[in-house]
C-alpha cells in the first residue's frame, strides 16, 4: 500500500481544531471524574451530608455504573444522533449533574448527580476518540489518540488543585460548582466542532460529507458496509469469541480487564482518603493525586512504544506486577520523597497496564472480530470499575482501611496472572504479521 499523502495546511488546521476541542472536553471529563476522590477526605472529615465511609464507596460506584451505561449506549446513540451532538449532550449532562451535586441536601440526591454525571462521562470518551480518528490523517491516528488520552489525566491533576485551593477555605460544594463551568464550553463545540465524516456517510449523507471534506481539504473515510449484514456479522463475531477453545482465552481477557479497572477506579476514588488514613495531611494527599496523574500521562506516552518492542501481552503482565508492588508499598510508611516517587511510578504503570490489555486483545484477534473482542473486554472490565470504589468504602466502613492498598494490590496480581496465562496460550484467531497495528486506548 502506498503511504498516505501528507495533509494539506487546511487539513492540518481542522485536525488540530478537532483534537483541541476534543482534548478540552476530555479534560473536563477527567476533572469531573476525579473531583469526587479529591474532595472525599474533606467530606468524610466534616461529615458532609452525613456521609459514612460505606456510603462514600457506594457513591463512587454510582458514577462508575453510570459510566458503564454511558459507554455501552454511546455507540448506538451516536449512530442515531451523530458524534458531535452526542459529545455536546455528554458535556452538558455531566456539567448539569455536577450542579445537582453542588446543590444536594442529602446523600440520595448527591448519588443521583454522580450517577447522571457518570452516564455523560462514560459516553464522552469513546465518542471523542471516534471524532479525532475521523480527522487524524497521514498515519498519525495512534499518536493523536494517545495525545487525546493525556487530557483525562490532566483533568485529574486539575481536580487536585481545585480541591486544594477551594475546598478548605470555601467548602466541598465549590469544587462541584467548578465542574459546572464546562457548560460555557458547549457553545464553542456547537459553533466550531465539525460533524463526524463516518457518521455522515453511514447515514447516507454523502454529499454533506463530501462538501465538508472538500472545505477542509481532507480525505473521506471508507464507506461503511450495508447495515443488515453488519448486524449479522457483529453477532457472529461475538459467538466466535466462544467457539472451540476460544472461550478460555476470552474469559481470561475479561477477568484481567475486571481486575485492571477495579484497580484503576478503586485507586482513583480512594487514593487521597487512604493516604490521609496513613497519616499524611490533606495537602500531601492531594499532591499524590497530581503525581499519580502525571505518571498516567507519561505511561500513556510510553506504553505503546514498549508494547511494540517487547509485545503487549508480556509488557501488560509486567506492568501489572509493578503496579501491584507500587500499590502495596503505599501501605508502608516511607519518607515523603520516596512515597512521592512510588505514587508517580504506580501511576505510570497502572494507567497503561489496562490499556495494554486492549492492545493484547486487538493484536490477537482477527479483523472481523477485533472490534467486538475489544468492546466486550472493555465492557466486562467496567463491572470491576463499579466494584472497586465500593470495595474501598466497605473496607473503611468496617475499620479495615489498612487493607485497602493490599486489596487493590491483589487485584493487580490477579490481572497479571490472567493476562500472563492468556499470553502463553496461542490463539487460533491470531492475526497475520502484516495486520495493521492496534490503537491503544484506556478505560
Image (spheres, grey):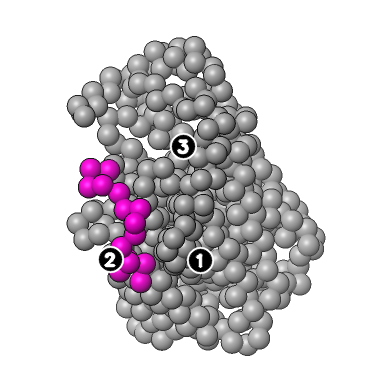
User: Which of these two is toward me, 381 or 126?
Assistant: 381
The residue beneath circle 3 is 130
Magenta region: 421-435
Q: CA distance from mark 1 to mark 3?
A: 24 Å
- For the point 34% across and 56% down, the residue is 428
Is residue 226 shown in magenta? no
Predominant secondary structure in magenta? loop
Image spot of residue 119 (x, y percent): 64, 49
Label 3: how many residues lie within 10 Å, few (<14), some (14-19) or many (20+)? some
Image spot of residue 187 (x, y percent): 59, 29
- For the point 30% across and 69% down, the residue is 424
Instruction: Tell me the element at label 3.
Output: helix
Instruction: Tell me the element at label 1.
Output: helix
User: Which of these two is toward me, 146 or 236?
Assistant: 236
The residue beneath circle 2 is 314
Residue 258's disc is 1
- Labels 1 & 2 near each other (Cβ < 8 A): no
Image spot of residue 18 (x, y percent): 43, 31
Is residue 424 shown in magenta? yes
Kindly indicate the quadrant of the structure image that contains residue 185: top right
Q: Earlier in the sequence, mark 2 or mark 3?
A: 3
Label 2: how many residues lie within 10 Å, few (<14), some (14-19) or many (20+)? some
Q: Earlier in the sequence, mark 1 or mark 2?
A: 1
Query: Relative to 439, is 129 on the left or the right?
Result: right
Query: Relative to 139, is 376 on the left or the right?
Result: right
- Nearer the observer: mark 1 or 3; the answer is 1
User: Which of these two is toward me, 432 or 342?
Assistant: 432
Label 1: how many residues lie within 10 Å, few (<14), some (14-19) or many (20+)? many
Amino acid at each position: 500500500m502506498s503511504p498516505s499523502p501528507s495533509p494539506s495546511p487546511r487539513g492540518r488546521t481542522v485536525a488540530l481544531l478537532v483534537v483541541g476541542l476534543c482534548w478540552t472536553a476530555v479534560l473536563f471529563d477527567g476533572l469531573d471524574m476525579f473531583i469526587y476522590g479529591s474532595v472525599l477526605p474533606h467530606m468524610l472529615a466534616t461529615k458532609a451530608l452525613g456521609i459514612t465511609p460505606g456510603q462514600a464507596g457506594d457513591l463512587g460506584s454510582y458514577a462508575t455504573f453510570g459510566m458503564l451505561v454511558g459507554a455501552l449506549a454511546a455507540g448506538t446513540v451516536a449512530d442515531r444522533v451523530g458524534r458531535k451532538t452526542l459529545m455536546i449532550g455528554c458535556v452538558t449532562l455531566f456539567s448539569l449533574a455536577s450542579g445537582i451535586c453542588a446543590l444536594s441536601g442529602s446523600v440520595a440526591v448527591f448519588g443521583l448527580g454522580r450517577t447522571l454525571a457518570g452516564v455523560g462521562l462514560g459516553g464522552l470518551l469513546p465518542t471523542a476518540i471516534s471524532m479525532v480518528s475521523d480527522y487524524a490523517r497521514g498515519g498519525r491516528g495512534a499518536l493523536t489518540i494517545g495525545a487525546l488520552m493525556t487530557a483525562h489525566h490532566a483533568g485529574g491533576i486539575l481536580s487536585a488543585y481545585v480541591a486544594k485551593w477551594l475546598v478548605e477555605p470555601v467548602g466541598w460544594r465549590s469544587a462541584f460548582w467548578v465542574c459546572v463551568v464546562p457548560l460555557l464550553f458547549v457553545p464553542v463545540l456547537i459553533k466550531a466542532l465539525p460533524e463526524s465524516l463516518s457518521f455522515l456517510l453511514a447515514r447516507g449523507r454523502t454529499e454533506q460529507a463530501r462538501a465538508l471534506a472538500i472545505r477542509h481539504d481532507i480525505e473521506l473515510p471508507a464507506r461503511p458496509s450495508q447495515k443488515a449484514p453488519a448486524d449479522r456479522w457483529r453477532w457472529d463475531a461475538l459467538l466466535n469469541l466462544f467457539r472451540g477453545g476460544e472461550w478460555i482465552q476470552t474469559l481470561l481477557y475479561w477477568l484481567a480487564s475486571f481486575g485492571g479497572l477495579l484497580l484503576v477506579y478503586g485507586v482513583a476514588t480512594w487514593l487521597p482518603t487512604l493516604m490521609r488514613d496513613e497519616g499524611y495531611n490533606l495537602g500531601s494527599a492531594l499532591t499524590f493525586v497530581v503525581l499519580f496523574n502525571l505518571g498516567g500521562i507519561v505511561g500513556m506516552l510510553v506504553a505503546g512504544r514498549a508494547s511494540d518492542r517487547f509485545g503487549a501481552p508480556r509488557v501488560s503482565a509486567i506492568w501489572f506486577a509493578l503496579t501491584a508492588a507500587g500499590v502495596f508499598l503505599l501501605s508502608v510508611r516511607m519518607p515523603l520523597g520516596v512515597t512521592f516517587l512510588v505514587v508517580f511510578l504506580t501511576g505510570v504503570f497502572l494507567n497503561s497496564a489496562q490499556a495494554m490489555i486492549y492492545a493484547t486483545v486487538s493484536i490477537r484477534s482477527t479483523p472481523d472480530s477485533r472490534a467486538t473482542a475489544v468492546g466486550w473486554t472493555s465492557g466486562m472490565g467496567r463491572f470491576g470499575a463499579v466494584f472497586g470504589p465500593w470495595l474501598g468504602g466497605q473496607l473503611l466502613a468496617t475499620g479495615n482501611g489498612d487493607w485497602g492498598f493490599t486489596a487493590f494490590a491483589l487485584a493487580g496480581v490477579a490481572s497479571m496472572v490472567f493476562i500472563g496465562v492468556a499470553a502463553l496460550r496461542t490463539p487460533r484467531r491470531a492475526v497475520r504479521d502484516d495486520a495493521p497495528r492496534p490503537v491503544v486506548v484506556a478505560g
